[in-house]
Image: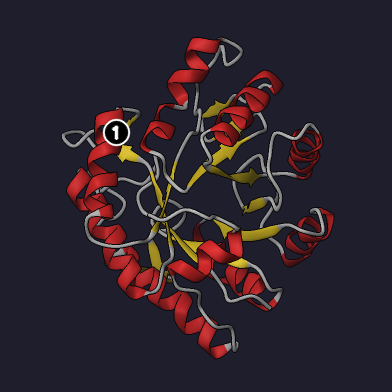
């Protein structure tokens, strides 16, 4: 097996301080949490940004830039910026598609790539085939590796379409997202099924929501995949115990890997595994 890459999803769009007072909101808090997670063993930081005053999700490029610069000034963790389109309609409009892809201007190593339309909480994620092809082409041209988000089995087929058109460079990297309402359920059988229908040359990681996070990443460790933890997906360290930080969740993932005899990849090793031939 390859060494195991740990991603940390630092803040996401949904968790609030009413749920867990340790959720980072400001650019400094988000960046500091990513750096602390790097020290704990994470090799990739998945970044959303928030309005610093309200904590609500934001698409402000200046906030992304501040977080990016703060992280990059302190460590070489791979930066994965979101391009998610929560509750955005009209995604066949080129101006909206370009707006959604603004974080690529910062030249991160990776970006998340939602490719399937689905309900998401009380809203929805809209990803038309026009969006998929337009975004994949932009990521390819800007040399930003897409982390292909798989919330259900049909999304694997969409990704195969994009790969077949030459819009995603080999080897592809998939994030298997389990336990999201309206997506595939977080069960061992579903995780293994998704793994088996991926292209043979693929790298893959697993995330799961809430109480499913650590059981599913344990499955991922055993099955030879990579894993994602962090406040975006889960705010608890254990049943009834709120996590104090993202780093605490990363440390638990490292401990699980050690118990199961998987070595954890550092940042340079993660770049080699994912075929990212760029200096930070």
Q: Is residue 212 above or below residue 79?
A: below
* Residue under the point 65% across and 34% down: 115
Horizontal placement of 272 versus 31: left or right?
Answer: right
Q: Quadrant of residue 167?
A: top right
Q: Position of residue 235 (x, y in %)?
A: 38, 59
Horizontal placement of 206 versus 171: left or right?
Answer: left
Q: Which residue is mark 1?
A: 56
Nearest the eye: 19 or 221: 221
Secondary structure under badge 1? loop
Q: Is residue 50 in view from this perspective?
A: no
* Residue under the point 20% across and 52% down: 29
Q: Position of residue 269 (x, y in %)?
A: 51, 71
Horizontal placement of 199 versus 46: left or right?
Answer: right
Q: Is residue 200 above or below residue 38?
A: above
Badge 1: few (under 14), some or many (20 or more) residues near its Cα, within 10 Å? Answer: some
Horizontal placement of 20 versus 172: left or right?
Answer: left
Q: Position of residue 278 (x, y in %)?
A: 47, 53
Q: Specify the quadrant that holds the C terminus.
A: bottom left
* Residue under the point 26% across and 47% down: 18
Q: Position of residue 166 (x, y in %)?
A: 75, 35
Q: Specify the quadrant that holds the N terminus.
A: bottom right
């Amino acid at each position: 097996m390859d060494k195991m890459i740990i991603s940390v999803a630092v803040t996401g769009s949904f968790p609030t301080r009413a749920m867990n007072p340790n959720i980072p909101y400001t650019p400094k808090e988000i960046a500091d949490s990513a750096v602390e997670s790097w020290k704990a063993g994470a090799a990739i930081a998945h970044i959303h940004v928030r309005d610093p005053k309200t904590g609500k999700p934001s698409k402000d490029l200046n906030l992304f830039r501040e977080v990016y610069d703060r992280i990059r000034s302190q460590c070489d963790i791979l930066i994965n910026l979101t391009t998610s389109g929560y509750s955005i309609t009209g995604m066949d409009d080129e101006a909206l598609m370009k707006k959604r892809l603004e974080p690529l201007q910062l030249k991160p190593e990776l970006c998340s790539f939602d490719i399937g339309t689905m309900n998401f909480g009380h809203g929805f994620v809209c990803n038309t085939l026009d969006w998929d092809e337009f975004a994949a082409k932009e990521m390819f041209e800007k040399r930003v590796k897409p982390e292909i988000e798989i919330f259900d089995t049909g999304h694997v087929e969409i990704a195969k379409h994009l790969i077949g058109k030459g819009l995603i460079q080999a080897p592809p990297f998939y994030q298997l997202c389990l336990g999201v309402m309206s997506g595939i359920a977080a069960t061992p059988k579903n995780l293994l099924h998704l793994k088996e229908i991926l292209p043979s040359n693929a790298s893959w990681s697993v995330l799961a929501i809430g109480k499913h996070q650590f059981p599913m990443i344990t499955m991922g460790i055993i099955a030879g995949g990579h894993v994602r933890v962090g406040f975006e997906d889960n705010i608890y360290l254990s049943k009834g115990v709120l996590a104090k930080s993202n780093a605490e969740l990363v440390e638990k993932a490292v401990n699980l890997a050690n118990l199961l005899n998987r070595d954890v990849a550092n940042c340079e090793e993660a770049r080699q595994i994912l075929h990212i031939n760029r200096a930070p």
